[in-house]
Image (cartoon, coloured by chain):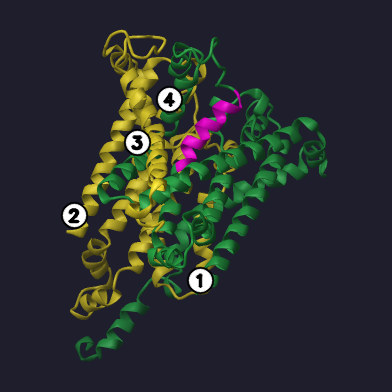
Chain colours: A yellow, B green
Amino acid sequence: MLLNFNTLGSWKWFLIAVTTLTSAFLLLPILFIAALSFGSSQWLIFPPPSWTLKWYEALFADPRWLESAWTSFRIALIVTVLSVLIGLVASFGLVRGTFMGRGALRALFMTPMILPVVVLAVALYAFFLKVGLAGTTTGFVIAHLVVALPFSILALTGALEGFDKSIEDAAVLCGASPLKARVLITLPCISHGLFSAAIFSFLTSWDEVVLAIFMASPTLQTLPVKIWATLRQDLTPVIAAASTLLILITLILMLLAAALKKGLKA
Amino acid sequence: MVSTLEPQAKIEMARKRRLLPQGMGATLPALILVLVFFVLPVVALLTRSFTEPVTGLQNYVELLGSSTYLKIFFNTFFVSALVTVISLLVGFPVAWALAIMPQRGANIVFGIVLLSMWTNLLARTYAWMVLLQRTGVINKTLMSLGIIDTPLVMVNNLVGVTVGMTYIMLPFIIIPLYGVIRKIDPMILQAAALCGATRWQAFRAVLLPLAMPGIASGALMVFVMSLGYFVTPALLGGTANMMLAELIAQFVQSLVNWGMGGAAALVLLIVTLSLYALQLRLFNAAGQGRA
């Protein structure tokens, strides 16, 4: 009755109404920003009086925007590589290992995910001030790695648990070294896990704001820090242009992930 | 003569050649990272709350004894609770509809939910700053419709924070609730109908109790996430309704008062971790109840 769309009666229209309104609520701000980034009004009047590309020109003409985007990309890339590598090795240990306290260790690895990020940001900031890592790329990478690693371990332990180890053993029996068996047999089999670990690690670093605000220096800032600093001054449409490009990247990554999922099922 | 070994022995040998005792070594890089750059700094920060400027509990006396700070604690809980309740009231029907909708419609709604969740946090907050401002679309529309005469103030106050945070939290409640409702067997509700229950009775006595584990854990998650939120309250909220995360940042960044910053961090940490512990217990209890 209540779980069959056709026998819901008048309740069906209530559910459809709430769902439609919520979808609009979730979608419209995103479309709105994209539209405004092409609008000519400095004061973000909607609908825009005319259309223009000048905010994109301003964005690409300002070396600070480009530089911060490059910094973001560079940091996210290093974080992704390290997060997948460390996560992969740790996941092998967690899934295949038989040592005591594996459960506790796994819980410890997950805690950076549930701790309020502002606490970690303040704590790392204090620590980095002492050891001289504040405002450095290394500091940025470490901070983002701490919050990206749980996603990586989550994705990779999941993938490894779903992989039948006897296939790897078969390769060893056929004469492959354990390492060779892992690289040539196991890794391709868990490639979906590797891919989601990589994508989550990248996005975690690329979109991260709070840690970045504390790690940034006047000469080293990521794109979110640049947006944050600009936002605190005024709501210039240049931010709309930057945001639209970020949304576009998100959309591409989402479609890529969906295509990959479809490919896996096929 | 390796080739004469039994297959099992060969695998055992391969295992023995591995790094450290039973895979422990493999977890070392991650363990060192977490210990040095997570546990150590957090413990050091919390310790400073008891040692700076002098050893003792004076930071906590000041934090919990002043009406200014108590107001911030209250406000943090109030905003988080408000956001949780609204997200739940809106999210439940959406999750429910998603679970039973025709596939094509559900895919579209799901796509929108995921897109909004994955869109950069600052881009989303910026959108609401623009939409809600004095000269923003919402005020313009309401004025042209004659509903209001003067623009409503919707940023830098409770309205702005609530709208902005609800927008961010909705996906986090819709997705887990969808999972829970989807797992409920439609036949149970069919049975309720056969026994003569009205829709309302079936909803209250069957659907709601069955969805309760999802509701509880989703609501707790949103509440806990809201408690520690920094970016959206800082941009859409006003100074009158500051939240705990902003207070921590302010102690450290503007006031350079590490003792008070550490104390506020410990308060946030204790609340967060105890709510997570509660969630784990609820979740386990629900699991055992079903088994």
As displayed, is residue A44 above or below residue B188?
Answer: above
Tag 1 secondary structure: helix
Give the distance between the C-alpha atoms of the residues marked 2 and 1, in whole angstroms. 35 Å
Q: Are marks 2 and 1 in contact (CB under 8 Å)?
A: no
As displayed, is residue B234 above or below residue A148?
Answer: above
User: Which residue is identified by label 2?
Assistant: A263
Residue A150 picture location, percent across and down: 45, 53
As displayed, is residue B168 above or below residue A99?
Answer: above
**Residue kind at label 3, given as amino acid type:** Arg
**Residue kind at label 4, given as amino acid type:** Ala
Give the distance between the C-alpha atoms of the residues marked 3 and 1, in whole angstroms. 48 Å
Per the rendering, the mark at residue B127 is 4
Residue B108 picture location, percent across and down: 29, 42
Nearest the viewer among B148 and B64 is: B148
User: Which residue is identified by label 1?
Assistant: B290
The lab-note entry on whether marks 2 and 1 share a chain reads: no
- Of badges 4 and 3, nearer the viewer stands 4
**Residue kind at label 2, given as amino acid type:** Gly
The lab-note entry on whether marks 4 and 2 share a chain reads: no
Residue B94 picture location, percent across and down: 42, 45
Chain ID, mark 4? B
Horizontal side of residue A242 vs A148, given as left or right: left
Residue A19 included in the magenta stretch of the image? no
Tag 3 secondary structure: helix
> Crowding at label 4, few (<14), some or many (≥20) Cα neighbours within 10 Å?
many
